[in-house]
Amino acid sequence: MAVEFPEVKPTSRSYRPGKFPQIQFEALNGATTTIRYGQKAFNAELNLTFANISDSKAALIIGNYRTSMATFDSVTFRSNNALAGLESALETYVSESGTGLKWRYAEPPQVESVYPGISTVTCTFTGYLDGV
């Protein structure tokens, strides 16, 4: 079962949709052929930055990372947390709703202390297709 991301709103976000499993062959004369191996995209990327948040909110993010990785669960996002500020049309794409992709931490969150009690946290997520 997926772990829900805490209610902490990012100050910036970048999203790259997944790519489709395909390979392109190029002949010596320049002719190309593309073979697609599936109909679902994978390896989407979501980067979230939480600038100048309280250390208690940073701790919520670290706790979410530890909880999800302890059981190797995916992470879900809602409009009141990492997807805050997106219009519904874009939110559908970024959440990867209905695509079969699940978000998982690509690496541990990076925490930078800015001022006593204030930190900036950066998280990177990868959208993967569960091989079930």
Image (cartoon, rainbow, N blue to C red):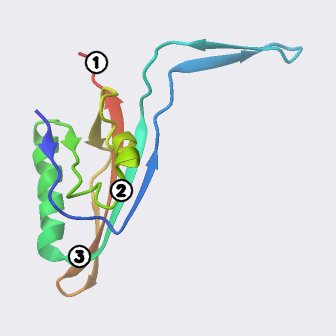
Residue 120 x/y as whole percent: 30, 73
Do residues under tags 2 and 1 come within 8 Å of each other at their CB atoms?
no
In this view, the residue farthest toward the bottom is: 116
Q: CA distance from mark 1 to mark 3?
A: 36 Å
Q: CA distance from mark 2 to mark 3?
A: 20 Å
N-terminal of the pair, mark 2 or mark 1, is 2
Q: Residue 131, labelled with which disc? A: 1
Q: How many marks?
A: 3
Q: CA distance from mark 2 to mark 1?
A: 30 Å
Q: Residue at x 20, y 64 (%)?
A: 8
In this view, the residue farthest toward the right is: 29
Crowding near pointer 1: few (<14 within 10 Å), some, many (20+)?
A: few
Q: What secondary structure is marked by label 1?
A: loop
Residue 59 x/y as whole percent: 13, 66
* Left or right of 123, for residue 32: right
* Location of residue 118 by image quarter: bottom left
Q: Which residue is mark 2?
A: 86
- The kind of residue tagged 1 is Gly
Q: Is residue 88 above or below residue 120?
A: above
Q: Nearer the viewer, residue 108 or 11?
A: 11
Badge nearest the viewer, 2 or 3: 2
* Location of residue 6 by image quarter: bottom left
- The kind of residue tagged 3 is Ile
Crowding near pointer 2: few (<14 within 10 Å), some, many (20+)?
A: few
